Image (tube, rainbow, N blue to C red):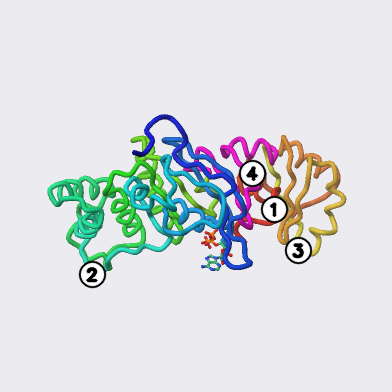
Amino acid sequence: MTQTNGAPVIRARGLRKTYGDFTAVDGIDFEVEPGESFGLLGPNGAGKSTTMRMIGGTLDRSGGQLQVLGLDPGTHGPEVRAHLGVVPQQDNLDEELRVRENIIMYGRYFGLPRSYLVPKAEELLEFAQLQAKAKEKVGNLSGGMKRRLTIARGLVNEPRILLLDEPTTGLDPQARHTLWDRLFRLKEAGTTLVVTTHFMDEAEQLCDRLIVVDHGAIMAQGSPRELIRDYSTREVVEVRFGSERNAQVVDRLEGVGERNEVLPDRILIYTKDGEAALEEIGRRDLHPVTSLVRRSSLEDVFLRLTGRSLVD
Ligand SMILES: Nc1ncnc2c1ncn2[C@@H]1O[C@H](COP(=O)(O)OP(=O)(O)OP(=O)(O)O)[C@@H](O)[C@H]1O
């Protein structure tokens, strides 16, 4: 029996994965509540996919505890997988089959009867906005359509938890927004989403709560708003003085905001009030080539936590 009460649907304690001497996941603790959209945000190689594969029961852990719907995926893989939908980083659709048949065949692997799968496939094609493509070969679909089909396919068993590994990598902005819209609908219908991403805008759009991971460890966790509140200021002023001058003027910016970050191409000034900071820069007779004021984002949180930019 899998759990049905309001307990966390995923619970990790000291979760570890090592490959020989290399530690990919370094003893992490987190919980995912039913119905929430939970994110793992971090750069390439942070250990996100490894964590997802341990949740999905396709990779054994090296240490710690892990429960998915109250069960250990290491020992109860099939029972756990029956309640999971998995959208891997690389689409692994059957290119030989047509769109509708991809969904039906995938359902057959779960042992689901055709009488259930035929109407279910129609419902999922509608959800994925692919009815018009039902008879197309998968190879003829765009990247965004393939992603939506992979998600539709992952929903064939009506999973309680959908695991999405980098769902929008490689998609153009419009395709990303269409996909986010579909994922919102799933969340509204009560599906728990677990999303890995290295895009902070995706994390901000999709995730109720997230862990920021780097080198297999959790650097911080909370809602996007909480993380920004705790690790950044409300506003950021970005100023450029030209590649040579940036390093030279940084001392003269001392005290304009609460904190400065010098990046190769610009200086970030963290402050409550960006316009006031810009005025102060003017009073100091500094003349940036360009300047802009923006709200803090998760990118700023990541930079603060690691000293590195998330997307280099
Ligand atoms: N089978 C393996 N053997 C050895 N090292 C591995 C293996 N699989 C993953 N790793 C290493 O573990 C680390 C974490 O990889 P993982 O794929 O989990 O990262 P990630 O955060 O998902 O990044 P990406 O988005 O690039 O997949 C990486 O340094 C990777 O090289």
Under mark 1, the amino acid is Thr
Quickly name the residue at label 2.
96
Residue 133 visible (yes or no): no
Q: Of tags 4 and 3, which is closer to the observer? A: 4
* Mark closest to the chain's N terminus, 1 or 3: 3
- Label 1 CB-ligand 1 distance < 8 A: no
Q: Nearer the viewer, residue 97 or 251?
A: 97
Residue 220 marker: 4
* Mark closest to the chain's N terminus, 4 or 2: 2
Quickly name the residue at label 3.
243
Under mark 3, the amino acid is Ser
Q: Kindly state the secondary structure of the residue where label 4 is placed.
A: strand
- Label 2 CB-ligand 1 distance < 8 A: no
Distance from disc 3 to disc 2, alpha carbons, whole Å, reads 52 Å
Crowd class of label 2 (few under 14; some 14 to 19; many from 20; radius 10 Å) = few
Q: Residue 37: where, in percent of width, then height?
A: 46, 40
* Mark closest to the chain's N terminus, 4 or 1: 4
Crowd class of label 1 (few under 14; some 14 to 19; many from 20; radius 10 Å) = few
Q: Which residues are magenta?
A: 204-233
